[in-house]
Amino acid sequence: MAWLTIEFQSETLHMPVMLDVLIPQGRGGYRTLYLLHGAGGDHASWLLKTQLADFVEGKNLAVVMPSGDNRCYVDNIHGKDYFQYVAHELIEQCETWFPLSKDKQDRFIAGMSMGGYGAFYAAFQEYNQYAKVFSYSGLLDILQRYDHPQGLDLFPVFGSRQQLLDGNFDLFHQATDNQEYFQKSQEGVTRFYIFCGLQDVRIDMSSQMYAHLQTLGYDVSYETAEGGHKWDYWNQCIARTIAIISEKKEAK
């Protein structure tokens, strides 16, 4: 397993960007997990604050960790196109640089807090791109967070409250609008996983999203465990994610 820190000029964002990559040392065709950080973090957060490197050792799995710059991984109303970067340019670049599988069934996306929102947003926007999507303590009700920003300035990202609604940034609305693409009766449908700590002050976002997706017929799982909005809980989440991703390989 190699750990690479990469800086390159993003044509989408029109600026230099950094990312960390864990890449297996083998024959290629690797499955890939795109792993997003939360507010205040960066491309190194997962490697510095969890045992991620240990969890993926010996797995046929690459992990790509970009920086989201507190911009929620969406195309900003008053800023740059972070969704286009994460969901398009980043994937194209990584699949050019490294011997990664281009099969949807080998591509996954996950994130904690703000990154959980970004992961679900990307999956709703690109329903043919990811086999599994994971939210850990995700800001899945972005309207609630917009109304109670708690130090995170969301106006540059979403504009006014009405622009947030009109721009289809709300995940509950997206889930309803995209229902036909994600009903679990379909072959190869994306599977959604929602994890949240029982002591997390925003656990209602996760439980309500789970209920909403269940009602709409999504292939969705919801898991809770002891823990708050903290890295020790997210360390458990990434371990569980690697185990889930690895189950598919063992079943083949």
Image (cartoon, helix red, strand yellow):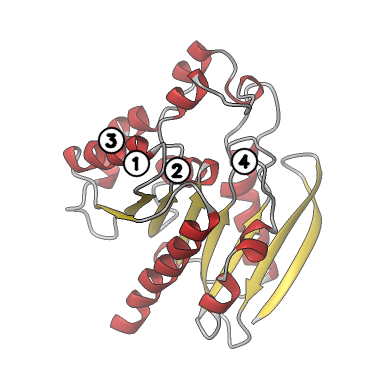
Q: Residues within 10 Å of mark 3 (few under 14, many from 20)?
A: some
Q: Report helix, strand or loop for mark 1.
A: helix
Q: Report helix, strand or loop for mark 3.
A: helix
Do the numbered discs 1 and 3 sit on residues whose CB atoms are within 8 Å?
yes
- Name which quarter of the figure residue 217 lies in: top left
Disc 4 and disc 2: Cα gap in Å?
Answer: 11 Å
Do the numbered discs 1 and 2 sit on residues whose CB atoms are within 8 Å?
yes
Disc 3 and disc 4: Cα gap in Å?
Answer: 22 Å
Q: Which residue is mark 2?
A: 138
Do the numbered discs 3 and 4 sit on residues whose CB atoms are within 8 Å?
no
Disc 3 and disc 2: Cα gap in Å?
Answer: 12 Å
Q: Earlier in the sequence, mark 3 or mark 2?
A: 2
Where residue 241 sits: x, y (%)? 42, 65
Mark 1: amino acid: Ser
Q: Report helix, strand or loop for mark 2.
A: loop
Q: Earlier in the sequence, mark 1 or mark 2?
A: 2
Whether residue 175 is visible: yes
At 53% from the left and 77% from the top, the residue drawn is 56
Q: Which residue is mark 4?
A: 39
At 23% from the left and 46% from the top, the residue drawn is 218
Q: Which disc, if any, is residue 208?
A: 3
Residue 120 to residue 177: above or below = below
Mark 4: amino acid: Ala
Q: Which disc, if any, is residue 206?
A: 1
Q: Which disc, if any, is residue 221?
A: none
Mark 2: amino acid: Gly
Q: Earlier in the sequence, mark 3 or mark 4?
A: 4
Disc 1 and disc 2: Cα gap in Å?
Answer: 7 Å
Where residue 200 sits: x, y (%)? 41, 43
